[in-house]
Amino acid sequence: MTLSGRVAVVTGASQGIGRTIALKLALAGATVVVVARNQSKLDELATEIQDAGGKASAFVVDVGNEEQVKATFKQIIAQLGKIEILVNNAGITRDQLVMRMKRADWDEVINTNLTSAYLCTQQAISSMLKQRWGRIINVTSIFGQIGQAGQANYASSKAGLIGFTMAIAREVASRSITCNAVAPGFIETAMTSTLTEEFKQTALKMIPLGRVGTTGDVASAVAFLASEEAGYITGHVLNVNGGMHMG
């Protein structure tokens, strides 16, 4: 698979899954625009890609802020001429039982995880429509499929992304633009490193493949969906969970 000549934007790229996705797409030949709120981490990532012979640029933006998203995507298109691949990966958690969950924590998670995908897609899609080619990939979660106690906000945002994926897939299919989602299961990241060992062992018993996933597992799925080889796949949710959830 090659993404040579393609321009890709990855949100939430400063760490974890997003960072590995950006590296993977760059390795496949794409010019990668990394987007997040942490300037130093983004600069470090862009430098790493460039040192490896790839092409990358970094933009600091709060993807939940409409005006920042509009200004940033306008700047990206002005500099690079187009956007062909968009990976909506930005995500946060604010866990709490729903009876104790603060409205601010609900709003922040929905805004960052779901509304940002709408904002970024809306700004990128005109470029894709003009070219009659595009790939939109939304990073959802197994918990958007099966739910999780203490994560009503997170699960709702990720389930919303699945519905969003299917709606956009139907809207733009006639222009050779695909929209798919990747649903990671238990992945070893900074976000999961804070979980108790007891929780991790319980989760591990639920994974038929018998291991926790890596960010590379998710990045490989994203790279495939971004490629020409995945041109006849749209509106699909690709599970990357070791068999933890099937169907």
Image (cartoon, rainbow, N blue to C red):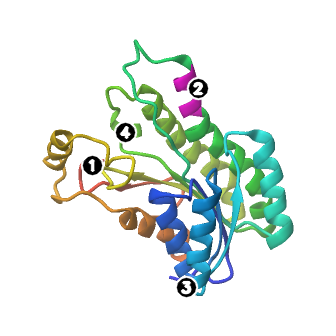
Cα–Cα span, label 2 and label 1: 30 Å
Which mark is on residue 246?
Answer: 1
Closest to the camera, between mark 4 and mark 1, is 4
Cα–Cα span, label 4 and label 1: 13 Å
Residue assigned mark 3: 52
Residue 60 belongs to magenta span: no
Cα–Cα span, label 2 and label 4: 18 Å
- In this view of the protein, can residue 231 be seen by the observer? no
Quadrant assignment, res 72:
bottom right
Residue 53 picture location, percent across and down: 59, 87
Mark 4 residue type: Phe
Q: How many numbered callouts? A: 4
Cα–Cα span, label 4 and label 3: 35 Å
Residue assigned mark 4: 143
Residue bounds of the magenta highlight: 104-110
Q: If you read the primary sequence from the N terminus, does the residue marked by circle 2 or circle 1 appear first?
A: 2
Residue assigned mark 2: 107
Which mark is on residue 213?
Answer: none
Vertical side of 106 occupied by 112: above or below: below
Residue 109 belongs to magenta span: yes
Mark 3 residue type: Ala
Q: If you read the primary sequence from the N terminus, does the residue marked by circle 2 or circle 4 appear first?
A: 2
Residue 79 picture location, percent across and down: 83, 70
Residue at 13% from the left image edge and 47% from the top image edge: 205
Cα–Cα span, label 3 and label 1: 37 Å
Q: Secondary structure at mark 3?
A: loop
